[in-house]
Amino acid sequence: MSTTTQSLHTNVDASEHPIAPFLRMDRMPHIWCPTCGIGTIVKCFASALEQTKVDLDKTSIVSGIGCTGRVAGYMKLDAFHTTHGRAIPFATGLKLGRPELLVTVFSGDGDLSGIGGNHLIHAARRNIDILCILVNNFIYGMTGGQNAPTTPVSARSSTMPYGNFEHPFNLVHLAASCGAPYVARWTCLHIRRLTKTFAEALTRKGFRFIEVIAPCSTLYARLNKLGSGLDLMRFYHDNAEIKHGADTREAEIGFQDRILCGKFVDIEKPTFTELMHEHYTKTLGDRFVPMKPEGGWIHE
Amino acid sequence: MKADPAGVLTGVHYLDGDFACGEGAMAAGCRFVAGYPITPSTEVVERISRRFPMMGGTFIQMEDELASMAAVVGAAWTGTKSMTVTSGPGFSLMMENIGLGAMMETPCVVVNVQRGGPSTGLPTMAGQADMMQARWGSHGDYEPIALSPRSPQEAFDFTIDAFNLAEQYRVPVFVMMDECVGHMTEKVVIPPAEEIEIVPRKLTEKPPGEYLPYQNNGNKVPEFARAGDGYRFHTTGLTHDERGYPEMSEECQEKNVSRLLEKIRGSADKITRFVENETDGADVVVLSYGITARVARMGIDLARKKGVKVGEIRLEVVWPFPEKRIRELSKKVKAFVVPEINYGQMVLEVERCAAGRAGAILVPHAGGGVHDPESISSAILGAVK
Ligand SMILES: Cc1ncc(C[n+]2csc(CCOP(=O)(O)OP(=O)(O)O)c2C)c(N)n1
Ligand code: SF4
Ligand SMILES: [Mg+2]
């Protein structure tokens, strides 16, 4: 068992690419389309891991299902590619089963806010100590461009061929109103800011929610005649508005409308585990035996 | 190895089956439980949530059973022994991540205190109608292990067995209780920790780099590495190769699925467990499990008084099913009589193994109570007519 911080257990040379040692290069090429935004976000996350020098041996990544759901599979960490929507409860088990782990959930908008929406709100409410990265491409990418709970009104998807008429989620507002102590949003154009936010969030505790707007060039862009992924990046450049500390109620996203970005919430708040420890210490005194940082009893 | 004394409430107790099951889990070393309340299973987690804070265990009441099962699979990957507890409606929701547990080869335990179904059914009354769901409930091919206790004492003992089997075979193991056993209060003897045999989580000794998470190690059960030990492994619910990397091919699917099945089928003789009484020279054999085994005993005694030669098979492990023994017996007896609180589930296995050589007579009960022993004795008498 290694106790080093950033030993990489890999033969991959960083000169190949600065973040190559953080990836499973033996799984390249990845499945993502050209100009898809997901890869850029992975790059920012890996850079943040490098900058923060977190102990990679103790860092786990959990994804659900979808194009974004493939992220866990490309990261050279303890990596879990789980079921559709269940990354957050799976990660909750990991974190509570071995409290010393640094656990990140990395998944899509459909995965985390559609089928997994119930888990998202409850993890935020409980303030479970996980970093949650949600890639919002406004669509179900993996399955061919169906409507998502995030699809803006009037945007086309394969199951809303005449345009979406449902109200979409304002995800940063949802997370904030459920109690998440750290809430931010960037687009994948904001490489430096996003990396900085990831790095900051990696060193915070509690349910940290970061939404990243990203182009699905193949489906969302094509179905809506928005050009290539590059054109969407230009759109972000022209329409992203940075307003730290903004009221998240103002952060709704309309079709090809302004995208409010920034860090909206950053507060101190006890996590689920801290509350549990504090409460049992108060009520049970010396009789309270917390789970060890390395997990429950398994050895003699 | 021996049990951790912190989890063992040594002594002679008067406990219901749910509490006894909870005590069994804690004695077995379970230190993580995620669950969602549902009658008639809730007392298991109520017991655990009271005692866990004193032994380094964590209980969390999740938002639903989808989450409970997902959390249990996640926690099991840290090496912490993990369990969830539910009844029919929750069992249905758990099927998704029971499949994930089977595919990722995750040792964990799922307790189902069965009530009457379908749907919300009879929340506070007995049923045994989830037996086939335990066998086939999640999609795809996999082989489960399930036990069925008939008393609070067995609820304690079999829950420990369930944890031990989960460790040996790296599968989710089911404890298929029923409302009667769950809510019945009887004497339960909990031995001292040093008398309880525990199978610990065996961690691979291979160094990172040499370790392959899904390598077939002869016995078909791969070695385990837990999250946080530097292995940087990958695991997925997708069809995967030895590295745990997704591979979408017929060849990989064949290799993967056949190993998942063979690791249980190949050891079925070691896993199956049943009690057999007076089958020598018997004309009829009654096969039963769980609470119904106790009622069947009364039915057998009634039939014997009328001169019928009746043997008994009481399943302790219900899955895998003791195919071999039922095949052998089917060459000697006229019929099997199978009482169960459902409209014919385990009887289908008996019928399959008897293959027409002997009858397989169901004594059904739709749920809400147990059989009238006379319904069983008259089925026995009918079988020899
Ligand atoms: C239970 C279940 N239902 C449906 C699916 C099919 N499915 C796979 S990915 C996906 C949508 C993913 O969308 P999102 O999370 O937005 O990810 P993206 O591909 O856009 O990154 C769906 C519906 C599934 N795998 N499992
Ligand atoms: S379908 Fe869309 S989200 Fe999926 S990889 Fe292609 S561009 Fe990316
Ligand atoms: Mg999406």
Image: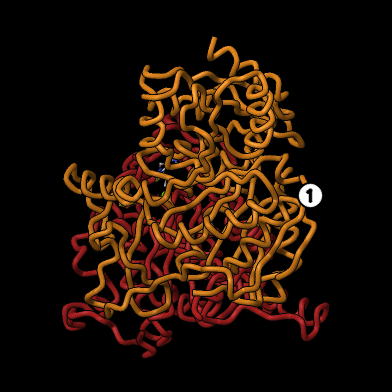
Task: Residue at 42% x, 19% y: name it.
Answer: B358
Chain coloured orange in this rendering: B
Residue B372 screen position, x and y as percent: 73, 23
Q: Is mark 1 within 8 Å of ligand 1?
A: no
Q: Is residue B240 above or below residue B203?
A: above
Q: Is residue B86 above or below residue A93?
A: above
Q: Of all residues shown, which one is farthest toward the right?
A: A283
Describe residue B172's horizontal placement relative to residue A145 as left or right.
Answer: right
Residue A183 seen in this snapshot? no
Chain coloured red in this rendering: A
Q: Nearer the viewer, residue A299 or B316?
A: B316
Q: Nearer the viewer, residue A127 or A220?
A: A127
Q: Name the chain letter of the residue that bears numbered label 1.
A: B
Amino acid type of the residue that numbered disc 1 sits on in the rendered structure: Thr
Task: Residue at 57% x, 73% y: name it.
Answer: B3
Residue A11 screen position, x and y as percent: 18, 80
Query: Taking the image as four quarters, which one is ligand 1 found in?
Result: top left
Residue A19 screen position, x and y as percent: 27, 77
Could you tell me which secondary element the residue under label 1 belongs to? strand
Residue B15 seen in this snapshot? yes
Residue identifier under label 1: B185
Q: Of all residues shown, which one is farthest toward the bottom?
A: A4
Describe residue B204's horizontal placement relative to residue A92 as left or right.
Answer: left
Q: Nearer the viewer, residue A196 or A85?
A: A85
Give the image quarter of residue B22. Answer: bottom right
